[in-house]
Image (cartoon, rainbow, N blue to C red):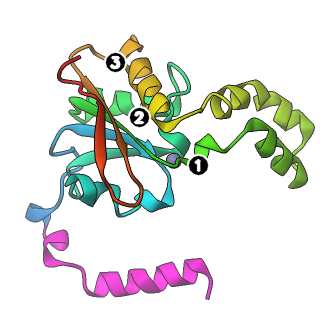
Amino acid sequence: MTVLDQMLAANHEFMKHLPTEYACPTKQVCKYPKRQIAIITCMDTRLVDFLEPALGIARGEAKMIKTAGNSITGVFSETIRSLLVCIFELGVKEIFVIGHEDCGMMHSTSQSLIENMTARGISPDAIAMIKTELEHWTDGFEHPVENVLDAVHKIKANPLIPKDVAVHGLIVHPHSGEAEVLVNGYEA
Ligand SMILES: [Zn+2]
């Protein structure tokens, strides 16, 4: 059975037992985040179905933006674009950058990525096209705590982000779920 088959079988079961509140239009979860927050976090598999319960975030309450290493890579990067939609169209008033201990991006280097890409047949021309940005991104990631502080700083310094949006920085443990506040956006 392929992963797709497994998903479709799970979907079939899910639809059969869909909780009634999901199907009832008056009880449907709104697309606007109820708690008016956006969370930028890592794509780490250990955070799937874990980060939200660890912080008491329920379905319908937050916008979740996930990337490798929750970094901010540019003034109009994909993450910033998502934040602009969150803030200007979906009512988001607070941003949480949430990194985690033992982030895989600490060990990822441009050199190993390029070697693996080359081994899989990616052309040197294509690699040359992204090499500088790739180096800046992967080799610039030294520690998850510093990376959260850097991301918070970049969001706050971004001229596209309104000054009244609170930007918080947290770090969580991927096994215990324990969260530590690095930047309290209410005090900044
Ligand atoms: Zn990570």
> Which of the pair 107/23 is nearer the observer?
107
Residue occupied by mark 1: 104
> Which of the pair 141/15 is nearer the observer?
141
Residue occupied by mark 3: 161
Residue at 71% across / 32% down in the picture? 134
Residue at 82% across / 48% down in the picture? 117
In which quarter of the view is residue 37 placed? top left
Task: State the image coordinates of residue 28 (x, y, percent, origin top left).
Answer: 16, 62
Task: State the image coordinates of residue 32 (x, y, percent, origin top left).
Answer: 21, 44
Q: Amino acid at mark 2?
A: Ser
**Numbered range of the magenta stretch:** 1-24
> Which of the pair 144/155 is nearer the observer?
144
Residue 64, which numbered label? none
Q: Amino acid at mark 1?
A: Gly
Sooner in the amino-acid sequence: mark 3 or mark 2:
2
Kindly state the secondary structure of the residue where label 2 is placed.
helix
Q: Nearer the viewer, mark 3 or mark 1?
A: 1
